[in-house]
Image (tube, rainbow, N blue to C red):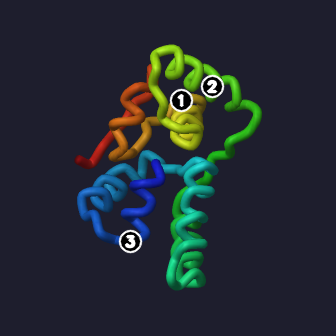
Amino acid sequence: MDTDWAVYLLRGDASQIVEQVRDRREAGISVSAITVAELHVGVEQARDRAEAERALNRLLEAFPVLPFDSALAPTFGRIQSSLRERGIEIGDFDAAIAATSLYYGLTLLTNNIRHFRHVEGLKVVSAT
């Protein structure tokens, strides 16, 4: 699950995403450690940081976190190299999330099709 979907879940303001997650829950949904890092930025910027952190912790109890480690580094390198050769920039965090999905053979749940559609071999599901 990409950061945008996690934010929608935390805010509870996108019923189609909540339904998609509920429908896919049995198949297994996880988040990348990169997504967790991005979500912590939101916690730090929240008006009520304590409540935002509690909400994030509840989310992380519900979904396993996949590490971003040296095993994923070659996949990340291939993605960024391929994109740059084609003149496409998606940012390191999105490339790292894509690398996590590809490395583990998972479908990425995101509404950020604009970036992720450029990653060769990445399966993407959007709620839009």
Per the image, label 3 sits on a secondary structure element best described as helix
Disc 2 residue type (three-letter)? Thr
Crowd around label 2: few <14 · some 14–19 · many ≥20 (10 Å): some
The residue at 52%/77% (across/down) is 46
Q: Residue tagged by mark 2?
A: 75
Q: Nearer the viewer, mark 1 or mark 3?
A: 3
| Residue 1: image tag | none
Q: In this orientation, which residue lies closer to the viewer: 107 or 88? A: 88
Q: Is residue 53 above or below residue 106?
A: below
Q: Is residue 18 above or below residue 75?
A: below
Disc 3 residue type (three-letter)? Arg
Q: Residue furthest front?
A: 87
Per the image, label 1 sits on a secondary structure element best described as helix
Residue 70 on image: x %, y %? 76, 33
Q: In this orientation, which residue lies closer to the viewer: 112 or 63? A: 112
Per the image, label 2 sits on a secondary structure element best described as helix
Q: Residue tagged by mark 1?
A: 102
Disc 1 residue type (three-letter)? Leu
Q: Nearer the viewer, mark 1 or mark 2?
A: 2
Q: Earlier in the sequence, mark 1 or mark 3?
A: 3
Q: Residue tagged by mark 3?
A: 11
Crowd around label 3: few <14 · some 14–19 · many ≥20 (10 Å): few
